[in-house]
Image (cartoon, helix red, strand yellow):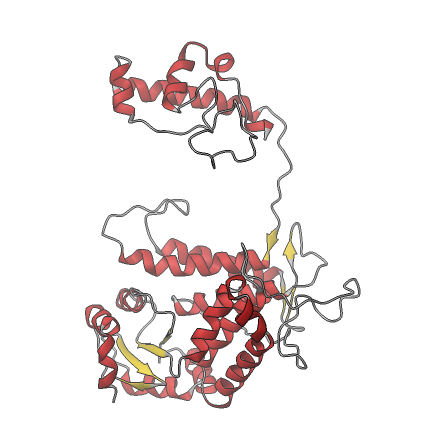
Amino acid sequence: MLIFMFKIDDILGEHASLFKEHYYVKPSGNCDLSSMSDPHKEFKGKNVLIERNDSSALASKLGMSIQEYLDILGECKKKLFDVRAKRPRPHLDDKVIVSWNGLAISSFAKASKILKGEPQGTNFNFPVVGCDPKEYMEVAEKAANFIRRHLYNEQTRRLQHSFRNGPSNAPGFLDDYAFLISGLLDLYEFGGSTDWLDELFLDREGGAYFNTPGEDPSVLLRVKEDHDGAEPSGNSVSAINLVRLVSMVSGSKSDHYRQIGEHLLAVFESRLKEMAMAVPLMCCAADMLSIPSRKQVVLVGHKPSEEFENMLAAAHASYDPNKTVIHIDPTNTAEMEFWETNNNKVALMARNNFAADKVVALVCQSFSCRPPVSSPESLQHMLSNKSASSSIV
């Protein structure tokens, strides 16, 4: 955008050469590092600032101390910033879209525990301060709370599609529901909680999910989207959501979700057989559903606590798409009521394995579990030991 374009020599004067060398600015432009750097030739003769050399080496080359070099560089950046600040700003698209935030919720929730396994002292560059993986969970929860507060109607159990200076009039689409439910599942599994799981878009005759609500008068043709492109299709994500729910709840509810998942995939059977490359995420859903018994990792203990956080990070330390992580604090009445309603096996495990002074982990297949462990190292070893399934009791 023009607001970010400068003629460096005119603005920086005597220090322009230092700035240009630091940021690899060339008279012919620097967007030619490869044939893919500028495939449409939009940046011919232009430069995108990039640091390719060490500051100490450049300072030595110019015969100055590193501090003097950095001071001059800082002055140059401030001058350019001040010039930019005086220009009219372009339109800012700052609306909040439920589907995109659902994807972001998933990413930040996962990062909160995956990054916890990084070496001590590792700095993470987002968000804000970025030195504590807990910040990622806070961002995920903030996004989920915003959607619940501003874009979800608890009476109708409906979502609105987006928010800018207030909720939009557009109702939520399939992607909004599918991506948000996926995000909430991740928010729960990686340490938070899940609130609602909605079946609004189930096409009870055809078995798949439509991309728009049936009551929208502006839509003449409703399409069952199945292409996994830059964004996954809502049906693919919905299928995976259903598979995950199958191993989280029990009894008739689990059977119900499995039946819906099987019916959904059956609708796209020909697509999966003939054009599997177009629906990679739906292929993942089909593979996940074909597993006779998904693995459950059940954590029982006081939340929040450092011991619980460490055990939860251990549960997520190894990648396994056929693993579900369930955590429960038996002293939390609301949590116990939730699991007694949706999966009494989990509630029973919590009552039988609770210890006030530690967090207990059970690794199960169809909720038949191996002996409990109470250290992150033991849990990681158990999850990485492929042959340990034979020891289920």
Quadrant that contains the C terminus: bottom left
> Is 29 or 278 nearer to us in this picture?
278
Can residue 142 be seen by looking at this rendering?
A: no
Q: Is residue 151 left or right of residue 317?
A: right
Residue found farthest to the top: 14
* Quadrant for the N terminus in the image: top right
**Left-right relation of 305 to 19:** left
At 48% from the left edge and 13% from the top edge, which residue is drawn?
A: 9
377 or 225, nearer to the observer: 225
**Residue drawn at x 41%, y 58% as measured from the top left:** 137
Q: Quadrant of residue 244?
A: bottom left
Residue 129 picture quarter: top left
The residue at 39%/24% (across/down) is 24
Residue 89: horizontal and vertical position, in percent? 62, 31
Residue 379: give x, y in percent of width and height: 23, 72
Measuring from the top left, give residue 361's x and y in whole percent: 27, 77
Decide which of 330, 30 is in the foreground and name it: 30
Q: Is residue 135 above or below residue 383?
A: above
Can you say whether 93 is above or below 270 in the image?
above
Q: Nearer the viewer, residue 294 or 148?
A: 294
Q: Quadrant of residue 378?
A: bottom left
* Residue depicted at x 57% and y 63%: 233
Numbered marks: total: 0
Question: x, y percentage for residue 51?
Answer: 37, 29
List the single residue furthest toward the front.
Answer: 274
Is residue 353 visible in the rendered image? The answer is yes
